[in-house]
Image: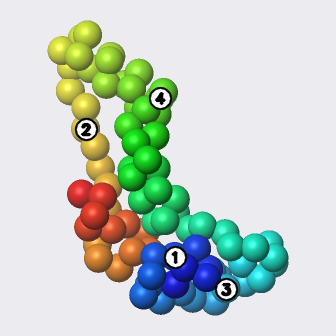
Amino acid sequence: GEAVGLPAQQMGNSEVGHLNLGAGRVVHQSLTYINRKIKDGSFFKNKCFLKVIQHVKTNKSKLHLLGLVSDGGVHSHLDHF
């Protein structure tokens, strides 16, 4: 859960626990980091991503995106689909 940088009610694992113990602080995992960036709007201001979008628009080209979608919250999450 939140004590180890995961969303509330999300079960952690030994890697997450050891990472937080070693750091001596809450280390936000990718899922909570991405959720925060989406919520505060900074996710949509990523310079590299915006540059790619501009290139696609300017050149009338295609952008192929590939990703994982899962409700597990480990390597991906349905909220990011």
Category of crowding for the residue at label 2, using alpha-carbon neighbours closer than 10 angstroms: few (below 14), some (14–19), many (at least 20): few
SS for dot 1 = loop
Look at label 1 and name its amino acid. Answer: Leu
| C-alpha distance separating marks 2 and 3 | 35 Å
Q: Quadrant of residue 72?
A: bottom left
Circle 4 sits on which residue? 48
* Residue 33: % across, % down: 52, 59
Nearest to the eye among marks 4 and 1: give it: 1
Coordinates of residue 59 in the picture (x, y in percent): 24, 11
Q: Which is more N-terminal, label 4 or label 3?
A: 3
Residue 56 in view here = yes
Check contact, mark 3 vs mark 1: CB within 8 A: no
Element type where label 3 sits in the image: helix
Q: Quadrant of the C terminus?
A: bottom left
Task: Name the residue tied to disc 1.
Answer: 6
| Residue 17's disc number | 3
**Mark seen at residue 26:** none
Q: Quadrant of residue 62?
A: top left
Residue type at tag 3: Gly
Residue picked out by circle 2: 64
Mark pair 3, 1: CA separation: 11 Å
Instruction: State the SS at label 4.
Output: helix
Q: Residue at x 25, y 31 (%)?
A: 63
Of the two numbered discs 3 and 1 in the rendering, the one whose residue sits closer to the viewer: 1
- Local crowd at mark 4 within 10 Å, few (<14), some, or many (≥20)? few
Amino acid under disc 2? His
Q: CA distance from mark 2 to mark 4?
A: 15 Å
Mark 2 vs 3, N-terminal side: 3
Query: Given this view, does label 1 or label 2 mark the residue nearer the observer?
Result: 1
Q: Earlier in the sequence, mark 2 or mark 4?
A: 4
